[in-house]
Image (tube, helix red, strand yellow):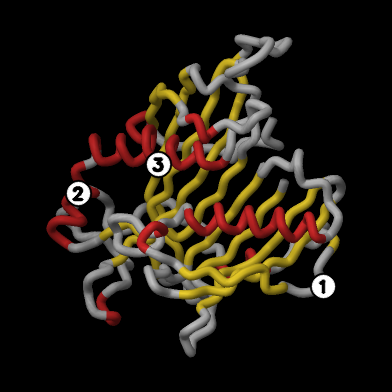
């Protein structure tokens, strides 16, 4: 089971959704545990699909004002099971708008956040049924944070600090959210023992069209998938038995997208906290003068 699900926001029923659907074969590992690849699917089925179906304001903001909600952060917890990939799962979603402020208490961002969780019935795709077969179990949860911006405006006009009065949403949403600086993910938690004293180069990656999506940059799910592979490789080098490690928690914060043809260095710092192994790291541009990371990642098995 996941250590705990991410808490869903307290929102009106109009901002909640539910959907049942089948997982993809690759979303369940050989033990029947849910993999993190399934959680963005829940985000789509009971998050974005519902938002775009119900909420004309989001379409109007894009169509009439050039304002898009750009993904800035994922948080995921997963590993619940066992679940049979042939059984439907239940997704529950909640979405909300909020704002952040700067040190002078001035609004500096408008956020759109979607939360989704998955539940199912215990089972296995192959083999004998587990002892709790048919029991309802929690499988995982995900939170996706987006910042409104005008991505096609010039640099001075991209930041959005208020929504248009005619969009059907409050100019500044009432809820205030803390802003989590992306670089904080590169700092190991206080209770973690550093298996690597400093971040080390895990691998250089050349991005190609296979890594991109219709937004014309590297897809947001490519980074965590690559990072998980590299962390497993590093833990193996350190003598950790990796064959039974399951990714349980992941957080990634995006600062700037990568594009096909670009190269990055992936930095990894292996950690241990109690009986858990994990890592922090970043994707650093290789061919740019500005070496600030494109994104920061923290994972726990």
In this rendering, would 187 be left or right of 180? right
Q: Identify the residue at image location x=28%, y=59%.
A: 68
Which of the labelled discs sits on residue 197, or is there none? 1
Secondary structure beneath dot 3 equals strand
Q: Identify the residue at image location x=73%, y=10%.
A: 131
Q: Residues within 10 Å of mark 2 (few under 14, many from 20)?
A: some
In this rendering, would 174 be left or right of 268? left
Out of 163 and 149, give the one closest to the viewer. Answer: 149
Q: Nearer the viewer, mark 3 or mark 2?
A: 2
Out of 243 and 150, give the one closest to the viewer. Answer: 243
Report the Cα–Cα distance between label 3 and label 2.
16 Å
Q: Identify the residue at image location x=56%, y=57%.
A: 226
| Position above or below: 69 against 248 | below
> How far across and how far down the image is residue 252, in percent?
55, 58
| Position above or below: 173 against 120 | below
Q: Identify the residue at image location x=28%, y=81%.
A: 156
Between discs 3 and 2, the one toward the N terminus: 2
Q: Which residue in the structure is indicated by mark 3? A: 95
> How far across and how far down the image is residue 95, in percent?
40, 41
Between discs 1 and 3, the one toward the N terminus: 3
Q: Which residue in the structure is indicated by mark 2? A: 59
Residue 174 seen from this side:
no
Out of 81 and 125, give the one closest to the viewer. Answer: 125
> How far across and how far down the image is residue 185, in percent?
63, 64
Secondary structure beneath dot 1 equals loop
> How far across and how far down the image is residue 274, in percent?
86, 48
Q: Residues within 10 Å of mark 3 (few under 14, many from 20)?
A: many
The outermost residue toward the left is 64
Between discs 1 and 2, the one toward the N terminus: 2
Residue 128 seen from this side:
yes
């Amino acid at each position: 089971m996941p250590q705990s699900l991410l808490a869903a926001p307290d929102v009106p029923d109009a901002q909640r959704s539910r959907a049942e659907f089948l997982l993809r074969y690759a979303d369940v590992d050989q033990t029947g545990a849910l993999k993190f690849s399934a959680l963005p699917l829940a985000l789509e089925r009971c998050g974005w699909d519902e938002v775009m179906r119900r909420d004309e304001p989001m379409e109007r903001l894009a169509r009439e004002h050039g304002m898009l909600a750009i993904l800035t952060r994922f948080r995921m917890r997963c590993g619940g099971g066992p679940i049979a990939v042939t059984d439907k799962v239940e997704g529950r979603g909640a979405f909300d708008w909020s704002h952040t402020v700067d040190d002078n208490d001035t609004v500096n961002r408008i956020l759109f956040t979607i939360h989704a969780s998955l539940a199912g019935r215990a089972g296995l795709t192959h083999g004998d049924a587990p002892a709790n077969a048919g029991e309802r179990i929690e499988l995982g949860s995900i939170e996706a944070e987006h910042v409104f911006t005008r991505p096609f405006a010039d640099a001075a006009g991209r930041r959005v600090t208020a929504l248009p009065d005619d969009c059907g949403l409050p100019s500044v949403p009432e809820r205030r959210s803390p802003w989590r600086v992306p670089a904080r993910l590169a700092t190991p938690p206080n209770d973690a023992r550093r298996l690597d004293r400093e971040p080390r180069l895990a691998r250089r990656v050349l991005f190609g069209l296979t890594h991109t999506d219709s937004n014309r940059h590297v897809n947001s799910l490519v980074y965590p998938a690559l990072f998980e592979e590299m962390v497993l490789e590093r833990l193996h080098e350190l003598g950790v038995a990796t064959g039974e490690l399951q990714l349980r928690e992941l957080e990634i914060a995006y600062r700037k997208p990568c594009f096909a043809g670009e190269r990055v260095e992936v930095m990894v710092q292996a950690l241990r906290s109690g009986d858990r192994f994990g890592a922090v790291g970043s994707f650093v541009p290789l061919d740019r003068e500005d070496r600030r990371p494109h994104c920061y990642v923290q994972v726990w098995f």
